[in-house]
Amino acid sequence: MDFPRHACAYAERLATTCEPFRRQLEPDARELDGDDGCSADPFGEQDDAAGTYGLKQRFPDRVLVMTSDSCFMNCRHCTRKGILRDAEVVRTDEELQNCVGYVKAHPQVRDVLLSGGDPLVLPDGEVLRFVEAFAALDQIEVVRLCTRAPCVNPERVTDGLARSLRSCGKVWVNTQFNCAGEVTPDATVACGRLVDAGLPVSCQTVLLAGVNDSVEAMLDLFRALQRARVRPYYVFQCDPVAGISHFRVPLEKAKMIAAECAERIGGLALPRFVADIPGAARKIPVEEL
Ligand SMILES: *Cc1c(COP(=O)(O)O)cnc(C)c1O
């Protein structure tokens, strides 16, 4: 298989008890169905912003910084499955300072996303090096830590890490859970550590055929997230990335699920169902498509 299969011990165990989670971890021959009309890099993420290494800007007020090139688990539906191993990742102080310089030269940027890969595969000191470098800028109001650790490796989310992130100020954690079975007691403890430290925690879910493509599966997930004090933020249509077409849910079905969820659960537990479309100025709500 082209894209590596890797999962930490916790994710391997979860896959034995949670079938919808197992489907996100086990390779599927359909990933190799050649010509699905999609690209390995639909968002041009292999191109860096001028003068930087590993910084991507698609929107005027926020930038994404690639801080790691690996994850606790290789999700089969990964939006970066075509580029992850070649992703340009900020490592040296000079590379980081170039990214900071870029942000300073673009005063409209107020929000920095630390992504990768999963930033939390790095040791705490490295994570804080990134967070502090951006949080120190007056123009930066939000530093988003994008990590699936609360779901796939909850022990990584220690009290010490949560406290350090909180003390940097400005940090929001954005995680990914795709079905209610992933919101285990361990995951709930991990999210609780972040929330108790004072960090806002939200969730980006990917709408995946055979995993969560029903109204009941989604409502179960949103309720489980709310019990864990995690705010559902987005539900994404699969990105137009090569090798994930077997996960893609037809737009009409996505609209139906979104509309019915909106009728059946309160606003605080209701994320926006969106699609990320190359060239669009924002994530587009499915009902506009
Ligand atoms: C999705 C994305 C963001 C964040 O968008 P929000 O709608 O604010 O969550 C920022 N930068 C890039 C490059 C993105 O792909």
Image: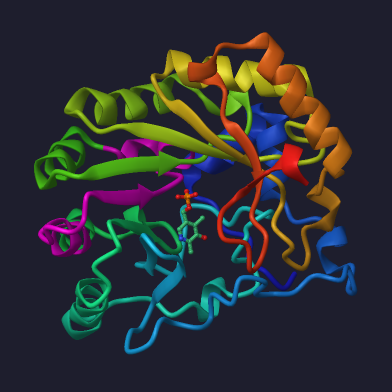
Which residue occupies 23% across, 58% down?
Answer: 127
Q: How many marks?
A: 0
Is the N terminus in the top left, top right, bottom left or bottom right quadrant? bottom right
Q: Quadrant of residue 260?
A: top right
Q: Quadrant of residue 90?
A: bottom left
Work out whether 268 lies above or below 115.
Answer: above
Locate residue 55, reporting x and y percent: 38, 74
User: In the figure, is residue 65 to the left or right of 34?
Assistant: left
Locate residue 217, reporting x and y percent: 72, 22
- Can residue 202 be seen in this snapshot? yes
Answer whether residue 123 is magenta in the image.
no
User: In the figure, is residue 124 to the left or right of 74?
Assistant: left
Q: Which residues are magenta?
A: 130-157
Locate residue 89, reporting x and y percent: 38, 76
Work out whether 221 lies above or below 288.
Answer: above
Answer whether residue 153 is magenta in the image.
yes
Which residue occupies 83% across, 57% down?
Answer: 245
Locate residue 182, reporting x and y percent: 56, 29
Pick the front one: 138 or 193: 138
Which residue occupies 73% across, 31% down?
Answer: 212
Which residue occupies 35% across, 83% down?
Answer: 53
Pick the front one: 263 or 36: 263
How has the structure been colored for display? rainbow
User: In the figure, is residue 35 to the left or right of 39?
Assistant: right
- Can residue 156 be seen in this snapshot? no
User: In the figure, is residue 282 to the left or right of 32?
Assistant: left
Pick the front one: 274 or 75: 274
